[in-house]
Amino acid sequence: QGHFVESGGGLVQPGGSLKLSCQATGFILRWYAVGWFRQVPGKEREAVLCLSASDDHSENSNAAKGRFSISRDRFVNTMFLQISTVTPEDTAIYYCAAGAACDENVGRVAAGYWGDGIQVTVFA
């Protein structure tokens, strides 16, 4: 049974940047589409970015707003989310996921594997 080992997140000041990581165990990440979601308390989980198995990028432009980037490193079987120039509105729980394919129109992965969530809090 595959799962993720997550790292990164925590407290960050506005204007800063951070990088979240999810290392896959039990499955080969490069064979899958991978994506990031986020959830703010009281709201539904929303897709942010997706990276297909062939490395095509897609994003939910309403969520990503050009400040988020997704990548993966096949040598360490890990996926990443880089967020630059963070704002308090980026405070959320961020979830990594992997699955069969991306819905390129909305930057969403059809997830079969989920991370447990990484808390990011942006404070002044």
Image: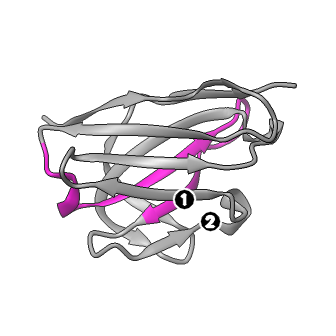
Q: CA distance from mark 2 to mark 1?
A: 11 Å
- Amino acid of disc 2: Asn
Disc ID at residue 60: 2
Residue lying at 18% horizontally and 62% vertically, measured from the top left: 31
> Looking at the image, is 98 positioned above or below residue 105?
above
Q: Quadrant of residue 33?
A: bottom left
Residue at disc 2, secondary structure? loop
In the displayed structure, does residue 105 sit left or right of residue 11? left
Q: Position of residue 86 (x, y in %)?
A: 75, 43
Q: Nearer the viewer, residue 58 or 81?
A: 81
In the displayed structure, does residue 60 sit left or right of residue 74? right
Say whether residue 19 is magenta.
Answer: no
Q: Which residues are drawn in magenta?
A: 27-50
Outermost residue toward the right? 124
In the displayed structure, does residue 24 sit left or right of residue 117? left
Disc ID at residue 31: none
Q: Which residue is mark 1?
A: 69
